[in-house]
Structure formats: structure tokens, C-alpha cells
């Protein structure tokens, strides 16, 4: 009997442990997925000389054939896609920091575990592709890191070279280079390898030198698809289905690669009804103002996420159009309600003669995201709140499971003791 009880108790304990693991595992899975957002890039290309300009075929007899010096490592992104040329595009959200580092796989004084192969000091290096001409030859040292960037205006910027980049770096080190915002990037590591050999007849050392490059190309883009209209006079944000008498301007919150279009519609009265008349439907730009009366539909798209966002803003004082934008009701229906005694309130809602209020549609996620004092919404706070809620529920679940386990064991043991007592009395 005692043996059966122990087996049952173990089964219950295992069940509760599995239950607790199920409650905790979603957080563990999310963490694991975050850790996986790392991407390795960079193939070795042999170059013709110290100018690192012309590619040379790496033959099977080349002493760099079959092994890597290292690779670049891109981390901190949320999603990865590719551009038209097949180069990776890393999408970032608010709070993401995309960083690039170089993971060194070799001992630079004993490459490929051969004492005759070392990264040498390239004393007359230059790379015209990265802005260093032959006339500006410089000491590249033991490897030089070069970075070129183009912004949304196609303006090219070349950073000062990081010379002697690999000096003192140990095998297995992951050397952080920088963090990167929106733009198109090219990063190269130029290095020279010395092969020490002896002349068999003269017994003199013969040093041969070869040049190599690891080049990567990638882009960074914001992953959001949002536009923020602000009142031109008050500076307050206008959410979807808002109205203003002053007009509004657009703020893309530094997302420079979004496509934005604005459609303006006027409503002209004809035969005692309002007829929709589209005045324009065209591209718009960050900071552009719209102050003429009309109903504006703002459409934003992100070509990398294929996402679309649409917002509707009314500029003007016509109460019917205010109600149309706020409630979404058809204009003819609004006029019918007014004829039946309904009233349009200052906020654009409609109060029927029966005192029932017709309000606007339920705000979507993008409506809830607000911008305060001209700053981008703190989505990180929203994410933290959601994460905290998940953690709270997990903790509560664990506590409940533990209480159930303890109560179960207590009850079972009491029953077991009662049975033992009864059994002892029967024997007497």
C-alpha cells in the first residue's frame, strides 16, 4: 500500500512540474528567439596588390585556400529580408540597437596553425574604393577596417580607417565595431599575409606577401509603418478619424524610407446632397503641411515589411464632415439623423433625439500609439508592460500549482495516517 502511495505521489509531482514548465516556457522561447537574431557575413577575396582593387582567383595552391580569418557578425535586429541585389536588409524597431562586430577565428601569428603564416604589417596600403588613393598610401598595420555609408539622400560618407585593427586581438575574440542606424553600408577588412619560407640552396629566408579582403554589404531600415499628423497651431497629435480647423503637418519619426501618399477630398453640395470630389492623390514628404479645408486620407507603406497604415483627418469647420470623419457614418445618413432631431456634438459624435450617442470607431493599435511633445511614442514601455503582464501571470500560475501540490500531499498523508491508525486498531 505504501509503495502504491509513493508511486502516485511521484506521478502528481511530475505532473505539477510539467505544468510549471509550460507556464514558464513561453518566456524562455521568446528569449531564445531573441538570442538567434545574429547573422554572419563575409567571404574571403584575394586581391591583386596593396591597392585592394582587382579581384584575383584564389587557386587551390593558395595558402589562404580552405580556411577563414573570420566573419562579420550583425546582431540586434528584429527581422531580416533582402533588397533587389540580394543584400541583407536588417529591420529594427524602437529600442533595437543593430551592431556589427568581427569574430576572429585565427591566431594572427600562426594562421591555419602554421607558424610560417602571419598577418603582416601592410606599410604601403591604400584602397581607392574607400577613399584612400595611391598617393595617400598609409600604414594599414595588421589589418585595416573600412566603412562606407549612404543615407536616404544617397549622400556617401566614408569613415576614417581603423588601421592595425587586428593587432593584439586573440583568436575567438568578437570585436565590436559600431552601432548602425538607417542607411546602406559597406564594410571591408583589408589585410596582408606573409608566408615565411627558406631558399633551399641559399638557406636564406624568402618572404612572399599576398593581399586579401573580406567585404560585406547590408542595409538598416526601421521596421515600423507609421505617420504622425500634428496640428499646425497647437502641436498636438491628431489620431485617426480626428479633425482640426487649423490644418496639420506630417512627422515620420525619422523613418526615412517609408512611402507616403495623401489623398484630399472635398464634398460639394449638389441636388441637396454632398458629392465626393477628389482634389489630389499624390506623394507627400516628412514635415509637409496641409491647411486647406477637406478630408485627407494619409497612406503609408513600408516596402520591406509590406505593411500599410491609413489615417483620415478632416480640416475645416463643417459639422457634418466632422461627424462623417469621427463616426464613419454615411453623409446622407447623418443628414437624415439631423432631420430627425439628432445633434452633432463638438467632438464630432452624434447624439440622437433619443439621447443615444453615436461615437467613433474603436481605436486601432496605431491610434493608441501617441506622440508627446513631438517625440516618437515609447513603444518600449508598451512592450515592457506586456512582458510584465506575462511574467505576473506566470508567477501566479507557478504559485497556484505549488499550493495545489502542497495541499494534495498534506491531504494524502493525513488519509494515509488515518488508514494506518485504523489498520492498527483492527489488529488489536
Image (cartoon, grey):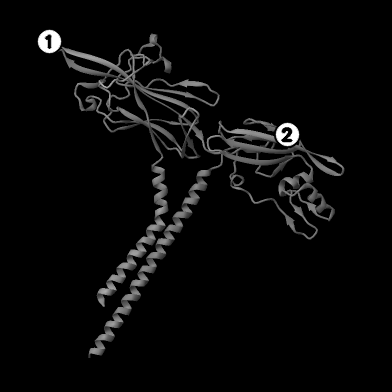
Q: Is residue 392 left or right of residue 263?
A: left
Of residues 203 and 320, the one nearer the viewer is 203
> Considering only vertical position in the picture, is 327 above or below 8?
above
Residue that badge 1 annotates: 201
Other-residue count near label 1 (Cα within 10 Å), few / some / many at <14 / 14–19 / ≥20: few
Assign a secondary structure to mark 2: loop
Q: Is residue 317 left or right of residue 46?
A: right
Q: Quadrant of the N terminus?
A: bottom left
Residue at the spot 84% in from the left edge and 56% down from the top edge: 340
Q: Position of residue 378 (x, y in %)?
A: 53, 43
Residue that badge 2 annotates: 291
Q: Position of residue 246 (x, y in %)?
A: 73, 37
Picture quadrant of residue 59: top left
Q: Which dot, 2 or 1, sits closer to the camera?
A: 1
Residue at the spot 70% in from the left edge and 41% down from the top edge: 313
Picture quadrant of residue 163: top left
Residue at the spot 62% in from the left edge and 38% down from the top edge: 228
> Considering only vertical position in the picture, is 234 above or below 135?
below
Q: Quadrant of the C terminus?
A: bottom left
**How far apart, in angstroms, are the residues tagged by discs 2 and 1?**
88 Å
Give the residue furthest to the front: 60
Picture quadrant of residue 240: top right
Q: Is residue 232 visible?
A: no
Give the residue furthest to the bottom: 428
Amino acid at each position: 500500500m505504501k509503495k502504491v502511495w509513493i508511486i502516485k505521489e511521484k506521478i502528481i509531482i511530475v505532473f505539477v512540474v510539467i505544468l510549471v514548465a509550460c507556464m514558464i516556457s513561453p518566456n524562455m522561447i521568446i528569449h531564445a528567439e531573441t538570442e538567434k537574431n545574429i547573422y554572419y557575413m563575409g567571404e574571403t577575396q584575394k586581391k591583386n596588390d596593396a591597392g585592394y582593387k582587382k579581384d584575383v582567383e584564389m587557386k587551390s595552391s593558395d595558402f589562404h585556400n580552405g580556411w577563414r580569418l573570420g566573419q562579420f557578425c550583425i546582431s540586434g535586429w528584429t527581422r531580416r529580408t533582402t533588397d533587389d541585389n540580394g543584400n541583407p536588409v536588417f529591420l529594427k524597431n524602437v529600442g533595437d540597437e543593430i551592431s556589427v562586430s568581427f569574430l576572429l577565428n585565427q591566431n594572427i601569428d600562426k594562421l591555419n596553425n602554421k607558424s610560417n603564416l602571419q598577418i603582416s604589417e601592410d606599410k604601403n596600403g591604400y584602397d581607392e574604393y574607400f577613399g584612400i588613393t595611391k598617393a595617400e598610401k598609409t600604414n594599414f598595420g595588421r589589418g585595416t577596417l573600412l566603412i562606407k555609408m549612404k543615407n536616404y539622400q544617397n549622400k556617401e560618407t566614408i569613415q576614417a580607417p581603423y588601421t592595425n585593427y587586428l593587432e593584439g586581438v586573440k583568436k575567438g575574440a568578437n570585436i565590436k565595431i559600431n552601432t548602425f542606424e538607417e542607411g546602406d553600408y559597406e564594410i571591408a577588412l583589408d589585410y596582408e599575409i606573409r608566408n615565411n619560407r627558406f631558399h633551399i640552396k641559399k638557406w636564406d629566408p624568402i618572404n612572399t606577401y599576398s593581399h586579401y579582403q573580406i567585404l560585406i554589404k547590408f542595409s538598416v531600415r526601421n521596421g515600423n509603418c507609421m505617420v504622425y499628423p500634428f496640428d499646425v497651431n497647437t502641436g498636438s497629435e491628431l489620431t485617426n478619424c480626428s479633425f482640426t480647423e487649423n490644418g496639420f503637418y506630417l512627422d515620420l519619426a525619422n523613418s526615412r524610407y517609408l512611402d507616403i501618399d495623401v489623398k484630399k477630398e472635398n464634398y460639394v453640395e449638389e441636388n441637396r446632397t454632398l458629392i465626393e470630389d477628389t482634389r489630389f492623390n499624390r506623394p507627400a514628404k516628412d514635415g509637409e503641411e496641409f491647411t486647406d479645408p477637406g478630408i485627407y486620407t494619409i497612406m503609408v507603406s513600408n516596402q520591406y515589411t509590406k505593411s500599410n497604415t491609413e489615417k483620415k483627418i478632416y480640416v475645416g469647420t463643417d459639422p457634418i464632415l466632422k461627424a462623417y470623419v469621427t463616426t464613419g457614418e454615411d453623409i446622407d445618413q447623418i443628414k437624415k439623423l439631423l432631420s430627425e432631431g439628432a445633434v452633432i456634438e463638438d467632438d464630432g459624435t452624434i447624439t440622437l433625439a433619443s439621447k443615444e450617442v453615436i461615437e467613433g470607431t474603436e481605436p486601432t493599435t496605431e491610434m493608441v500609439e501617441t506622440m508627446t511633445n513631438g517625440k516618437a511614442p515609447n513603444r518600449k514601455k508598451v512592450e515592457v508592460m506586456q512582458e510584465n503582464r506575462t511574467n505576473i501571470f506566470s508567477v501566479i500560475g507557478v504559485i497556484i500549482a505549488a499550493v495545489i501540490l502542497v495541499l494534495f500531499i498534506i491531504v494524502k498523508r493525513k488519509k494515509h495516517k488515518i488508514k494506518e491508525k485504523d489498520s492498527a486498531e483492527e489488529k488489536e
